[in-house]
């Protein structure tokens, strides 16, 4: 009998074999900008070059992370959401979705979805649930909507409201891949009272450094990015009730009080919409 190595191999070893250390990868560079340690030299070099092109990239990354925390806090504390489908998780750092949610509601359930092997290896080790709640981690691509919904249903109750978290991930879906249809299909599967949370790097004449950084990335890194205007990002919320203050710079979505007149805009926009 021939031994089936694929069936007996440690899942962590399988994930490690998929990790490409020869090209910079967005999840690892994002971790580098946020001050983490889960990156390789190739990621640091690319991250530093992007910082030269767009010196505010660190503030952009932090603004996106803080937006996640404020959005999840609002959905749990003010809306009563107890279920989250977080697609495009990224490498674990401070205040991940389940940590913010379960700090307020220990019984909250979170399903993380990513197809990056390094993310998955870290997620399974670090993204552990409060004993009253539950977390799960799926190895899936955002494009595989049916598979995500089928597998997430083992943890989430799709008869009750769910918050769909798509932070910094729709940018990887090109215009020829039906990005609006993918987001719409996910939201169609969720009941009334569910919410959509999106953040997305924008293109704007006021922020040429963002365009230069994305151009460099698409020549040297993986996966490639598709920028959109703020108006194009807002289209993902068509048919939803967009919460105040609308689709804005992530730094300016319900920020903490600031004596200096409020935070400066960054090149990543975000918003929260409610399904009626």
Image (spheres, rainbow, N blue to C red):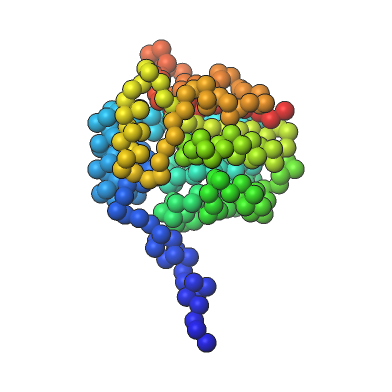
Identity of the residue drawn at 41% across and 54% down: 118
Query: Could you tell me which residue is drawn at 35 percent across and 55 percent down?
Result: 20
Name the residue at the bottom extreme: 1
- Counting from the top left corner in percent of width and height, residue 132 is at 63, 50
Q: Is residue 213 above or below residue 125?
A: above
Q: Is residue 18 left or right of residue 133?
A: left
Q: Residue 34 location, x and y as percent?
A: 36, 38
Quadrant location of the C terminus in the rendered image: top right
Rendered position, 34 above or below 121: above
Q: Position of residue 21 (x, y in %)?
A: 31, 54
Residue in front for this viewpoint, 261 or 120: 120
**What is the count of numbered marks?**
0
Q: Residue furthest front?
A: 176
Between 197 and 54, the one nearer to me in the picture:
54
Image: 213 above or below 93 = above
Q: Quadrant of residue 17?
A: bottom left
Is residue 152 visible to us here?
no
* Snapshot quadrant of residue 65: top left
Q: Residue at x 49, y 44 (%)?
A: 89
Front residue of 248 and 124: 248
x and y percent of residue 7 in the render?
52, 73
Q: Who's the residue at 47% across and 36% down the image?
A: 171
């Amino acid at each position: 009998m021939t031994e089936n190595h694929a069936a007996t191999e440690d899942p962590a070893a399988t994930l490690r074999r998929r990790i490409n250390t020869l090209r910079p990868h967005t999840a690892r560079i994002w971790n580098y900008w946020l001050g983490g340690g889960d990156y390789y030299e190739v990621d640091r070099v690319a991250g530093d070059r992007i910082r030269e092109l767009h010196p505010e990239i660190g503030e952009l990354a932090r603004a996106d992370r803080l937006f996640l925390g404020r959005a999840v806090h609002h959905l749990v504390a003010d809306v009563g959401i107890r279920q989250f489908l977080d697609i495009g998780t990224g490498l674990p750092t401070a205040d991940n979705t389940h940590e913010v949610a379960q700090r307020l509601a220990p019984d909250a359930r979170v399903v993380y979805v990513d197809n990056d092997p390094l993310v998955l290896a870290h997620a399974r080790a670090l993204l552990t649930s409060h004993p009253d709640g539950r977390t799960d981690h799926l190895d899936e691509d955002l494009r595989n909507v049916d598979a995500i919904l089928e597998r997430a249903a083992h943890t989430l109750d799709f008869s009750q409201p769910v918050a769909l978290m798509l932070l910094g991930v729709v940018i990887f879906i090109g215009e020829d891949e039906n990005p609006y249809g993918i987001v719409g299909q996910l939201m169609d599967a969720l009941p009334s009272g569910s919410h959509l949370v999106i953040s997305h790097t924008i293109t704007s004449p006021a922020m040429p450094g963002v365009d230069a950084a994305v151009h460099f990335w698409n020549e040297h890194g993986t996966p490639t990015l598709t920028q959109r205007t703020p108006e194009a990002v807002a289209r993902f919320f068509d048919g939803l009730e967009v919460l105040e203050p609308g689709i804005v710079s992530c730094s300016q979505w319900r920020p903490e009080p600031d004596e200096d007149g409020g935070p400066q805009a960054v090149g990543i926009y975000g918003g929260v919409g409610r399904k009626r």
